[in-house]
Structures are given as structure tokens and as C-alpha cells.
Image: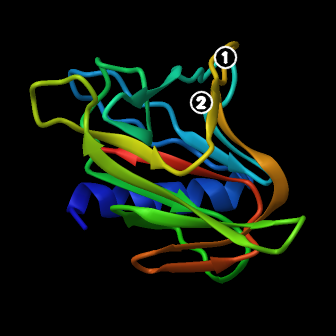
């Protein structure tokens, strides 16, 4: 973890403790900040952005990999890690991670469906900029409004999130912040 990330994490922890809210730590680089991703259960929803004050970007998929989704944000900063903070049981962060696995248990048959949030080369780019990528079967985009989202259609519950340093069971809704 870089010194900048440590200070950002410390500021986030203090601010969250004082306000009870998730706070987005923005960098001041040349490129635009990437919107956070908000993960919700019920039907698994991965939302881009928070609201009209922190709007998201539309989702598009890689034509060469049908189950891989990225936000359509060519002017966004390179993503070097994700800041993840959630509540639940076990080790729930906050922490900086390279990628994570979301486990979603279906209501109908208790089968576990896995989704991965990672960094991959930007779709359609000739450069090597790494951007947030969501990988999972049967995700469908809804790209209208201020908070475009990907949704898995079957009812269920987000039951576990794992990543380096994180093993959180029964997490509630939480935010994933791309960081530079």
C-alpha cells in the first residue's frame, strides 16, 4: 500500500466514524474520477455512481468476452486498486484490493453464483489503462438515469465477499471505490 493510499484510508476511516457514511476520496490527477460501484442484494445489482450529485457511467460489455462489463468512461483515471468497506461478519475492511469475488446465493435452490470485480485493460483501447471490470454470467445492463446498473435477474442474497485481506459474510449494501 502506498503512503498516499494509507493517508486516504486513514481519512476515510475517521470521516466514516464521524459521519457514519461512506466517503469517496478523490484524487487530483488530470483525468476524471471514476464513479464508485454500489453493490446491493435482493436481485444482485451493481450500480455505477451514487445519485445525481455523483452520477455513474453507462455499462458496456466486451464484444470478445460477453460476460465482462466496464463503465463507458474513456476519460476516467487508471484504476490501480479498489477501496472496499462494508459491514458484516468476519474481516470486512476497509482495505485496498486488486480484485474481489462476490458470492450470491440463489433463493430458489441455494446455489452459489460468483461474480468478480477486477481490473482489466479498457475495452476498445490500444493503450494499457486498467479499468474496473465486472465479470459474471447473465448480468444485464440498465443504462438510464443517474445510476446505471448491472443486474443479475434471479432473487437471492449477497452472502460473502472475498479478496486479499477481506472475508466478509452477510455483507449489506456497500461501495467499491476505484483508486489511482
Dot 2 falls on a residue whose secondary structure is loop
127 lies left or right of 57 = left
Q: Which residue appears farthest toward the bottom when viewing the image?
A: 90
- The residue located at (18%, 35%) in the rendering is 129
Q: Is residue 102 above or below residue 66?
A: below
Q: Is residue 46 above or below residue 53?
A: below
Occupied quadrant, residue 144 = top right
- The residue located at (54%, 72%) in the rendering is 93
Occupied quadrant, residue 173 = bottom right
**How far across and down, in percent of the image, does residue 163 sit?**
45, 73
**How far across and down, in percent of the image, does residue 18 sit?**
69, 56
Packing grade of label 1 (10 A; few <14, some 14-19, many >=20) is some
Q: Is residue 132 above or below residue 62?
A: below
- The residue located at (51%, 21%) in the rendering is 57
Q: Quadrant of the C terminus?
A: top left
Lower sequence index among marks 2 and 1:
2
Q: Are the residues tagged 2 and 1 within 8 Å (C-beta)?
A: yes
What number of labels is visible?
Answer: 2
Residue behind mark 1? 146
Q: Which residue appears farthest toward the left when viewing the image?
A: 127
Residue behind mark 2? 49
Amino acid at each position: 500500500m502506498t503512503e498516499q493510499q494509507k493517508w486516504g484510508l486513514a481519512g476515510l476511516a475517521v470521516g466514516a466514524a464521524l459521519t457514519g457514511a461512506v466517503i469517496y476520496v478523490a484524487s487530483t490527477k488530470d483525468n476524471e474520477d471514476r464513479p464508485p460501484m454500489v453493490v446491493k442484494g435482493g436481485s444482485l445489482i451493481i450500480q455505477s455512481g451514487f445519485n445525481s450529485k455523483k452520477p455513474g457511467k453507462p455499462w458496456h460489455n466486451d464484444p470478445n468476452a460477453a460476460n465482462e462489463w466496464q463503465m463507458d468512461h474513456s476519460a476516467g483515471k487508471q484504476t490501480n486498486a479498489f477501496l472496499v468497506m462494508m459491514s458484516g461478519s468476519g474481516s470486512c475492511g476497509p482495505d485496498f484490493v486488486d480484485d474481489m469475488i462476490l458470492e450470491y446465493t440463489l433463493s430458489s435452490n441455494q446455489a452459489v453464483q460468483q461474480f468478480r470485480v477486477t481490473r482489466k485493460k479498457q475495452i476498445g483501447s490500444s493503450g494499457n489503462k486498467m479499468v474496473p471490470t465486472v465479470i459474471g454470467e447473465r448480468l444485464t445492463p440498465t443504462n438510464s438515469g443517474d445510476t446505471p446498473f448491472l443486474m443479475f435477474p434471479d432473487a437471492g442474497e449477497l452472502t460473502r465477499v472475498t479478496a486479499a485481506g477481506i472475508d466478509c459474510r452477510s455483507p449489506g449494501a456497500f461501495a467499491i471505490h476505484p483508486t489511482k
